[in-house]
């Protein structure tokens, strides 16, 4: 029984795979054809939000102007946030932020000490 508990505990510490990710938030607003807004967030740290609106360009043509941002967890453990605009000038990245704080799993962020984890793995208390 103890081995099963340890196995479940360790698999939980490793986090989830992308294919197991769940949608935590989803919002879609569509005012065809003038404007739209959508956003979603998943349990594996992916977030995206986008606004689009038809506007008159300098040449008096209707164009769709889009503003958005997305974020994801990089393989280095940092959260990357990208903000962008897309319009008649193309797709332009406005800003890329990198949260350099290291990613911790929910298990570790709850404050369970390394010694407690070692004891669960059979290493004693110290």
Image: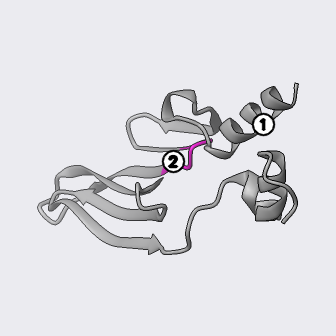
Q: How is the image coloured?
A: one colour
Assess whether residue 86 is covered by the magenta stretch. no
Q: Is residue 60 above or below residue 27?
A: below
Residue 19: which disc?
Answer: none
Residue at image x 68%, y 46%? 13
Q: Is residue 97 above or below residue 124?
A: below
Q: Is residue 50 above or below residue 19?
A: below
Q: Which secondary structure, mark 1? A: helix
Label 2 to label 1, Cα distance in Å? 29 Å
Residue at the left extreme of this rendering: 59
Front residue (pair 120, 43): 120
Residue 25 seen in the current view: yes
Residue that label 1 marks: 6
Question: Label 1: few (<14), some or many (≥20) within 10 Å?
Answer: some
Q: Position of residue 39 (x, y in %)?
A: 54, 45
Residue at image x 64%, y 60%? 104
Residue at image x 43%, y 72%? 98
- Report whether 102 appears left or right of 72: right
Question: Label 2: few (<14), some or many (≥20) within 10 Å?
Answer: some
Residue 112 seen in the current view: no
Q: Classify residue 11 by image quadrant.
A: top right
Q: Which secondary structure, mark 2? A: loop
Q: Earlier in the sequence, mark 2 or mark 1?
A: 1
Residue that label 2 marks: 46
**Residues drawn in magenta:** 40-48
- Report whether 68 appears left or right of 20: left
| Quadrant where the C terminus is found in the figure | bottom right
Assess whether residue 44 is covered by the magenta stretch. yes
- Report whether 57 appears left or right of 68: left
């Amino acid at each position: 029984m103890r081995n099963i508990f340890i196995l479940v505990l360790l698999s939980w510490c490793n986090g989830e795979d992308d294919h197991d990710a769940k949608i935590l938030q989803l919002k879609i607003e569509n005012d065809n054809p003038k404007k739209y807004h959508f956003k979603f967030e998943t349990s594996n740290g992916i977030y995206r939000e986008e606004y689009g609106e038809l506007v008159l360009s300098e040449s008096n043509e209707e164009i769709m102007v889009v503003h958005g941002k997305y974020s994801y967890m990089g393989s280095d453990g940092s959260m990357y946030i990208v903000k962008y605009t897309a319009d008649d000038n193309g797709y332009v990245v406005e800003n890329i932020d990198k949260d350099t704080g290291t990613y911790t799993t929910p298990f570790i962020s709850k404050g369970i000490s390394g010694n407690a984890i070692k004891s669960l793995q059979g290493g004693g208390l110290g």
